[in-house]
Amino acid sequence: MSSSVDEKGGGSNGPDNDSISVYERPKGLRGVYYHPITQIVMLAFVCFLCPGMFNALTGLGGGGQVNPTTSANSTCAVYATYAFFGFFAGTVNNKIGAKRTLLFGSLGYALYVGSYLQVLFFSCRAINIHPDAGWFVVTSGALLGVTAAFLWTAQGSIMLSYCTEAQKGIFISIFWAIFNLGAVVGAAVSFGQNIHSTVGILVLTILGVTIPLLMADPDKMIRTDGTRVVMPRLPSWKSEFYGLWVAIITDPMILLLFPMFFASNYFYTWQFNDYNSALFNIRARSLNNFMYWLSQIIGSGMIGVVLDSKRLRRRARAFVGWGILLAMTFTVHIWAYYYQRTYTRASVLADSQKMDIYDASYPAHVWLMIFYGLLDAMWQTTSFWLIGAMSNDTNKLAIYAGFYHSIQSAGAAGVWRMDAIGLPYMNIFLSTWCLVVAGLVFSFPMIYLRIRDTTVLEDEGLMKRDQEINNMKAKGMVENGNEMS
């Protein structure tokens, strides 16, 4: 692609507006293929077909086939390994490249879906002939956690580095809408045929593995404003692990977002296992699941428009987004508390006696799932937007994306395990509410002290480190040349 672009400006790449090199974007079909939105859509379809199908199974509570305890243990295994490997995934991403990291990360989802399927009979009917063989589901969950850490780190790096500062909210919303459409489709299939649908979901996850092979190389990407996406410059493993420390010590405000990250997957346990699975039969669970992920598409679009509004400065948009999350948090949790106090684990009925879609009380209950979907999408979109507002450096964004997914997975692993050992529903619900509020409380001073109307070079600790290293190398070459002469 380098032969298809002409440099229009001088200077070095960086966040300073006065020193940005501007390139001419390619034309025609090549221009469409290399357009950032095209690549974000392709990225979103990877997640549509892999994590999206995982969400469809998880949202049913036990995948619709496995008992909820086995499902909770498996999901705990997913997030436990995810939390460990996610912390270092940004380093690996910067070393081997986002495209290879994304490809590797997509491999574990088919195995996980296959563990729910367990056996394909010759008539393509899904038969669970080993109802007690939960070890396979749990083991595949642990392996999925390893690969998912790399997939989501590569996703965060690509999504946040391909867009300009003014486009980050919209790009995140586009990705989130398409990604959650995968769970909508998966839930719709499950609603229509709860047992046989796993075969179709498995095929879709396998298709998702092929898309990274078709995506453009990130180092050939040019943003819509003509600036080039600067990728890692073949760093050593030593320098990349040191970069983890540099990313924190040069920008410690990221630590104030850690509680927000921790809460970002924590609330799924109560929503899916302790509300959806506990109160509703399989048909109602499937419809709830469908409405939940459909509302996420709407929620991500709504908050994305706010976060990228041209009527407000970036700092003002950050505070408005925070205020929307605060209002939504208390709305849905006060509403949910009204339902949670009416049942316990001991009072949960057999599936045939649980709430159905034709029960008189069902509409109000499904609306709670819809509002939870809106809150989830707004929370995830705002979290990514805040990360993107802290930096434009691809290296740093990859590390921050790794932090985000590692910490959120640590929270999720803990709460799924608490659910598996039978902690009271009310305890899990109240801990969820408290953690979400804590995430907002800690993020407020970060927004106040750190978010600026534009990102400047002094914010880019890793970029400044790289510039210093390059300057030292250049100086050494000059000195060697003088000695030789």
Image: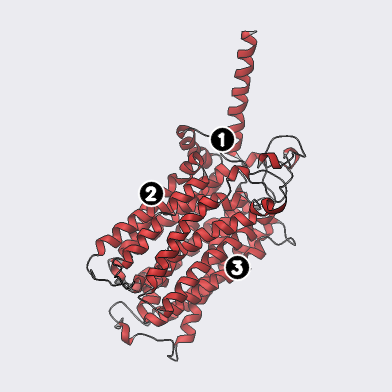
Q: Nearer the viewer, residue 346 or 416?
A: 416
Residue tagged by mark 3? 324
Q: SS class of the residue under badge 3?
A: helix
| Residue type of the residue flagged with mark 1 | Arg
Residue tagged by mark 2? 84
Residue 364 at what x, y percent from top left? 49, 85
Q: Residue at x 32, y 58 (%)?
A: 140
Q: How many marks?
A: 3
Residue extending farthest to the bottom is: 360
Residue tagged by mark 1? 233
Residue 196 at what x, y percent from top left? 36, 75
In this picture, is 395 found above or below 119?
Answer: above
Callouts 2 and 1 close, C-beta under 8 Å = no
Q: Residues within 10 Å of mark 2 (few under 14, many from 20)?
A: some
| Residue type of the residue flagged with mark 2 | Phe
Label 3 vs 1, first from the N-terminus: 1
Which of the two discs, 2 and 3, sits closer to the camera?
2
Q: Quadrant of the C terminus?
A: top right
Distance Cα–Cα, label 2 vs label 1: 26 Å
Callouts 3 and 1 close, C-beta under 8 Å = no
- Compared across the picture, whether 142 is left or right of 438 comes to left
| Residue type of the residue flagged with mark 3 | Ile
Which of the two discs, 3 and 1, sits closer to the camera?
1
Label 2 vs 1, first from the N-terminus: 2
Distance Cα–Cα, label 2 vs label 3: 32 Å
Label 2 vs 3, first from the N-terminus: 2
